[in-house]
Image: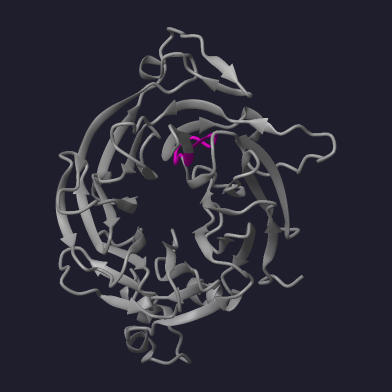
Amino acid sequence: MEDDAPVIYGLEFQARALTPQTAETDAIRFLVGTQSLKYDNQIHIIDFDDENNIINKNVLLHQVGEIWHISASPADKGVLATCYNKTSDSKVLTCAAVWRMPKELESGSHESPDDSSSTTQTLELLCHLDNTAHGNMACVLWEPMGDGKKIISLADNHILLWDLQESSSQAVAPWRRNGIFFPRDIQNWNITGGFPKKLASSASLEGKGQLKFTSGRWSPHHNCTQVATANDTTLRGWDTRTMSQIYCIENAHGQLVRDLDFNPNKQYYLASCGDDCRVKFWDTRNVTEPVKTLEEHSHWVWNVRYNHSHDQLILTGSSDSRVILSNMVSISSEPFGHLVDDDDLSDQEDPHREEKNKEPLQDSVIATYEEHEDSVYAVDWSSADPWLFASLSYDGRLVINRVPRALKYHILL
């Protein structure tokens, strides 16, 4: 098989939730959450063997409901959060909870169990993020550089900052139902190994109509004191210390904003995407106009992700069933490529080479991937390999691809 050939894994159920196992930096691992109305939902742990180009999987039961969003702790390989649907009093409410996977599955590079002899394991509930007074949960955001104890959840028009405390020695016996552990008193849960939590602070969107957050990202810059959110066509920045708004980009997109992401290397830059089929790049110091706009997709753009190591590489997924990899080098942290010193040039080399390297490089679409037959709801980069990424379509197809080798060497060399 060619090095750049895609690897495809098919789930049995529909799915739209995907995340890399953020704390895993050695093995290539992704977590996928399913959306099934008929069966118990699952989290598929996908390990990719890069040397042999094969996928190994393990499955965890997620019996509380269909998964709409999944995110992994940046500090603890075994901890993750899900947003899921729950029916209560004939109403469907999207809730959020923090879970721990079984100890033996926390690290990557596990071989797939024999399906005929293995029993599917369950998640251990660490805590619910109680949203009964706040509405439907849209997503859960982990503090990027923290110890995994600070998270933000977006519920309707509320932004909620939670503090997950270490457990004390005092134990409160949990009860168990269908293989899932539930604390007897969620508010004061203090069982060893669990996560008591408190709502540290919150803020709300104010305005006419039913304002609702659709997505958000926690900035890795400014000592992790800023979060960006999307609601309707608007992008907002928030200071997590005061939970006050610090910038607002009204009409950022012509239609609903679906997703956003921060440039990991340029502290004021972020990307957004939405139902106007566009991807836009912003400098939050001057929000009157986007710095750049991409118009390569033909339907709603659900996801945009910066590469963690090489911020010129941008990944997008859309309802047009395509994944597009773009090279936005002109607004990256290395817009002129690698500069060359005169001392590095031999007599035979072009003396004007440094001047040429100082010319801005051109932005371009690197590749369009069309392995999906349904809407692509999620794309993300591997935490362990900066040249590898995964995409997930609603029919449960997960595709793992690599940045083309020629571009990889061009960036490195």
Residue located 32% across and 64% down the image: 256
In the image, which residues are magenta? 73-85
Front-most of 340 and 224? Answer: 224
Front-most of 381 and 386? Answer: 381
Residue located 27% across and 53% down the image: 228
Q: Position of residue 84 (x, y in %)?
A: 48, 41
Q: Position of residue 232 (x, y in %)?
A: 28, 60
Residue 76 among those drawn in magenta: yes
Q: Position of residue 327 (x, y in %)?
A: 43, 76
Q: Is residue 260 above or below residue 341?
A: above
Left or right: 367 in relation to 2:
left
Residue 22 among those drawn in magenta: no
Q: Is residue 150 above or below residue 292?
A: above
Whether residue 82 appears in this view of the structure is no
Q: Position of residue 248 (x, y in %)?
A: 17, 59
Residue located 62% across and 38% down the image: 107
Indicate the quadrant where residue 124 lies. Answer: top right
